[in-house]
Image: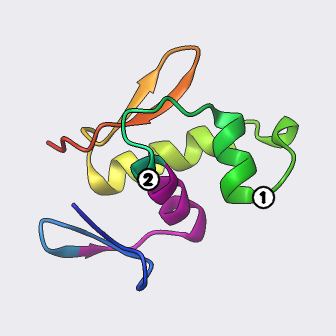
Amino acid sequence: MQIRINEQSVYHNGISVPLTYHEFFTLLYLASHPSWVLSKEQIYETVWKAAPEHCGAAVANVVYSLRRKIGDGYIETVVGSGYRFVGAGE
């Protein structure tokens, strides 16, 4: 997988993957901190730039959508803590 920051685009196996604003910046935030476990609140504050008490299911839905688009092997769920970018791919 290749993340092109200037183009705000992601390529998986050489094919452009269309992502929403929140999907792209969630992936970029996670990928910028490899192996860190980032909570839904941290992701929401950074990407949505809003108070984390309103994060609800928004982050979980974006991560789910990312996994469908780029594959399961890039983002790991750490139960009770948050998400971690592992970048291994499938």
Query: Mark 1 is on which residue type?
Result: Lys
Left or right, 57 with reference to 65? right
Q: Determine the residue positioned at 26% across, 47% down.
A: 71
The chief SS type of the magenta part is helix
Q: Which x, y percent locates residue 87?
A: 26, 44
Residue 87's label in the rendered image is none
| Relative horizontal placement of residue 44, taking residue 20 as reference (left or right) | right
* Relative height, residue 21 to residue 46 (above, below): below
Proximity of marks 1 and 2: CB atoms separated by less than 8 Å: no
The quarter of the image holding the C terminus is: top left
Residue at label 1? 49
Q: Where in the figure is residue 70, as x and y percent of width and height?
A: 29, 55
Q: Is residue 26 left or right of residue 18?
A: right
Q: Was residue 31 drawn as part of the magenta stretch in this picture?
A: no
Coordinates of residue 44 in the picture (x, y in percent): 70, 47
Residue sitting nearer the eye, 75 or 60: 75
In the rendered image, the residue lying farthest to the top is 80
Rounded to the nearest angstrom, the CA distance separating label 1 from label 2 is: 17 Å
Is residue 57 at least partly visible in the picture? no
Mark 2 highlights which residue?
32
Looking at the image, residue 23 sits to the left or right of residue 34; the answer is right
**Residue 29 drawn at (x, y percent):** 51, 53
Q: Toward the viewer: 79 or 64?
A: 79
Pointer 2 local density, CA inside 10 Å: few below 14, some 14–19, many at least 20: few
- SS type, badge 2: helix
Q: Residue at x 84, y 53 (%)?
A: 50
Disc 1 crowd rating (10 Å Cα; few below 14, some 14-19, many 20+) is: few
Figure quadrant of the N terminus: bottom left
Please tell me in which quadrant of the rendered image residue 10 appears. Answer: bottom left
Q: Which residues are magenta?
A: 16-29
First along the sequence among labels 1 and 2: 2
